[in-house]
């Protein structure tokens, strides 16, 4: 019997009414056509996870970009940090679980394969259910996936990351790639969604200075195929991103997928901060929408 993951933040961080939520997301995306790339070479996206009042429009740009690249069979890995549960390595839902959103259900794999046979991936629905860095993406995924042809097969795998070293992420990434390969052999394309906000609670000038460094960092690290640079910059305090491990793991997987003869490039879609909405410029949170493409 499948287990259902019910929303914990509907009605507070985003509307719980299907009509209100659908209208809000439509308002974010109705003018986006022609402003983003309908690119089949998309590897994945980076998007924020704050309340929709603050970052919903930014996250929607990235998810709209993802929706344009989807094919008939898609495996979408949602990678996010843990804000509440201390642990190491990764946590995933139990096989066959269903994600409930105001806009419909999302399907989780019924077979976790190698992920179910290793201690690197804990099956923890209770942890997954209370993590906003995952949940804030569910309605966006549901909104755009329901616009796909009915014949499409879309599988979502939420992966919550604990406190991990670069070596830990390498272990997680190697195992995860073996799992992804089984889906590729079955004709699926895979994409990632890396969930992160940027700097937290600096004044707007300091936040802007710090956040402006994140895209050059992503671009340089992917260009030399070295995701470790992201974690090093975070540890040194040169940038801030609560989902730094999610970004790093996403890049690891993308580099594993594409041979060294293929170049990957990060492109910024939109960047902003909470001060635009709140009016409080003394303590802002930074947000970024970006996409990783195969050149």
Image (spheres, helix red, strand yellow):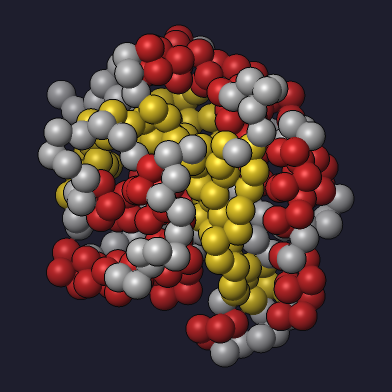
Examine the rendered structure and indicate whether residue 109 appears above or below residue 115: below
Q: Quadrant location of the C terminus?
A: top right
Which residue is more in the foreground, 267 or 47?
267
Q: Quadrant location of the N terminus?
A: top left
Q: Is residue 148 left or right of residue 262?
A: left
Which residue is more in the foreground, 15 or 124?
15
**Residue 90: % across, % down:** 54, 30
Residue shown at 75%/38% (left/top)? 223
Q: Is residue 134 left or right of residue 257?
A: left
**Residue 84: % across, % down:** 53, 49
Find the residue positioned furthest to the bottom: 279
Which residue is more in the foreground, 109 or 289?
289
Which residue is more in the foreground, 289 or 133?
289
Quadrant for residue 210, please give it: bottom right
Q: Is residue 239 left or right of residue 6?
A: right
Examine the rendered structure and indicate whether residue 49 appears above or below residue 231: below
Residue shown at 19%/55% (left/top)? 103
Q: Is residue 78 left or right of residue 206?
A: left
Residue shown at 34%/48% (left/top)? 67
Quadrant for residue 115, please give it: top left
**Residue 216: % across, % down:** 76, 54
Q: Is residue 157 something one can see in this rendering?
A: no
């Amino acid at each position: 019997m499948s287990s259902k993951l019910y929303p914990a933040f509907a009605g507070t961080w985003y509307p719980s009414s299907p009509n209100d939520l659908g209208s809000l997301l439509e308002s974010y995306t109705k003018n986006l056509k022609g402003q983003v790339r309908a690119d089949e070479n998309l590897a994945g996206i980076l998007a924020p996870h704050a309340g929709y009042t603050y970052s919903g429009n930014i996250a929607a740009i990235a998810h709209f970009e993802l929706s344009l690249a989807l094919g008939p069979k898609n495996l979408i890995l949602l990678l996010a940090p843990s804000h509440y549960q201390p642990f190491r390595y990764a946590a995933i839902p139990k096989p066959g679980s269903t994600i409930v959103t105001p806009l419909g259900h999302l399907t989780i794999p019924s077979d976790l394969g190698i992920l179910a046979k290793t201690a690197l991936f804990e099956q923890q629905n209770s942890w997954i259910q209370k993590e906003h860095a995952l949940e804030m993406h569910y309605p966006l995924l549901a909104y755009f996936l329901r616009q796909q042809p009915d014949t499409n097969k879309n599988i979502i795998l939420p992966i919550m990351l604990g406190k991990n070293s670069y070596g830990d992420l390498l272990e997680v990434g190697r195992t995860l790639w073996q799992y992804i390969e089984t889906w590729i052999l079955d004709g699926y394309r895979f994409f990632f969604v890396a969930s992160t906000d940027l700097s937290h609670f600096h004044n707007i000038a300091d936040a802007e200075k710090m956040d402006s460094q994140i895209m050059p960092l992503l671009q340089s690290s992917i260009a030399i195929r070295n995701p470790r640079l992201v974690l090093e910059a975070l540890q040194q305090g040169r940038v801030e991103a609560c989902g730094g491990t999610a970004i790093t793991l996403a890049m690891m997987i993308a580099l594993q997928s594409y041979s060294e003869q293929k170049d990957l490039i990060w492109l910024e879609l939109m960047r902003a901060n909470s001060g635009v909405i709140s009016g409080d410029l003394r303590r802002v949170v930074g947000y970024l929408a970006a996409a990783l493409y195969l050149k």
